[in-house]
Amino acid sequence: MRQSALLPVIAALFVMPAAPLFAQDPSPNPSPTSAQEFVTQAAIGDMYEVKAGKLAERKGVSAGVKSFGRHMVMAHTETTEKLKAAIAKSGLSITPPSDLDTKHQKMLDQLNSATGSDFDQTYLSQQEAAHQDALKLMQGYSNAGDNDVLKKAAAATARVVRQHIAMLAKLKT
């Protein structure tokens, strides 16, 4: 009888160390509140969009994918310029990164190796995920960021990202 009374205690000891793992935020990239981190993530997102858009223009099979890619190049070149202008206006001395992070480089590598309709499917899938991430970033920073000028820029960019998400929805139907 004594052994059976100890079993729940022993079992609890094995379960307890794992509990904090389940309590963590499941979101791998919570929205940053620092201007530096926001600028880094926004710049990398734009850089990826421009590079992926150029690939879509060149490798896309459907006219819709090619057209969407062309639009992404123009739109994200514009949001990059607006981000740089907001940084200058903010008075902060932040330099956006000039290279992609590992995650976005892997996404581009996937696009580079995809061909035909596989390319179109991979591109559209990546675009959905990238734009959802971008929307989360822009909304999060515009609500809780640490710089008012960049918060306004994030809010304006969120509107553009929502338009892109709507365009993607039409493209997939």
Image (cartoon, rainbow, N blue to C red):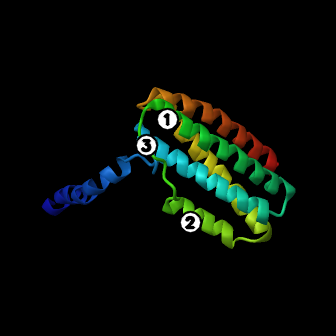
Q: Is residue 49 above or below residue 90?
A: below
Tell which of 170 and 105 is nearer to you: 105
Please, what secondary structure does the residue beneath circle 2 have? Answer: helix
Q: Quadrant of the N terminus?
A: bottom left
The residue identified by callout 2 is: 106
First-in-chain label (1 vs 2): 1
Q: Position of residue 43 (x, y in %)?
A: 54, 48
Q: Residue at x 55, y 34 (%)?
A: 154
- Verify CB contact (< 8 Å) between mark 1 and mark 2: no
C-alpha separation, residue under disc 2 versus residue under disc 3: 26 Å
Q: At 37% across and 51% down in the image, what residue appears?
A: 22
Give the labeled residue for mark 3.
94
Marks 3 and 1, how far apart at CA:
9 Å
Considering the numbered disc 3 on the image, is that residue within a helix, a strand or a loop? loop
The residue that mark 1 highlights is 88
Tell me the crowding category of disc 2: few under 14, some 14 to 19, or many 20 or more residues within 10 angstroms, Cα based.
Answer: few
On screen, residue 117 versus residue 45, left or right, reads right
- How many numbered marks, from 0 up? 3
The tag earlier along the polypeptide, 2 or 3, is 3
- Residue in the image at 79% along x and 70% along y: 116
Q: Mark 3: give few (<14), some (14-19) or many (20+) Cα within 10 Å.
A: some
Between 87 and 150, the one nearer to me in the picture: 87
Q: Mark on residue 22?
A: none
- Check disc 2 and give the amino acid type: Lys
- Look at label 1 and name its amino acid: Ala
Q: Nearer the viewer, mark 1 or mark 2?
A: 1
Q: Amino acid at mark 3?
A: Ile
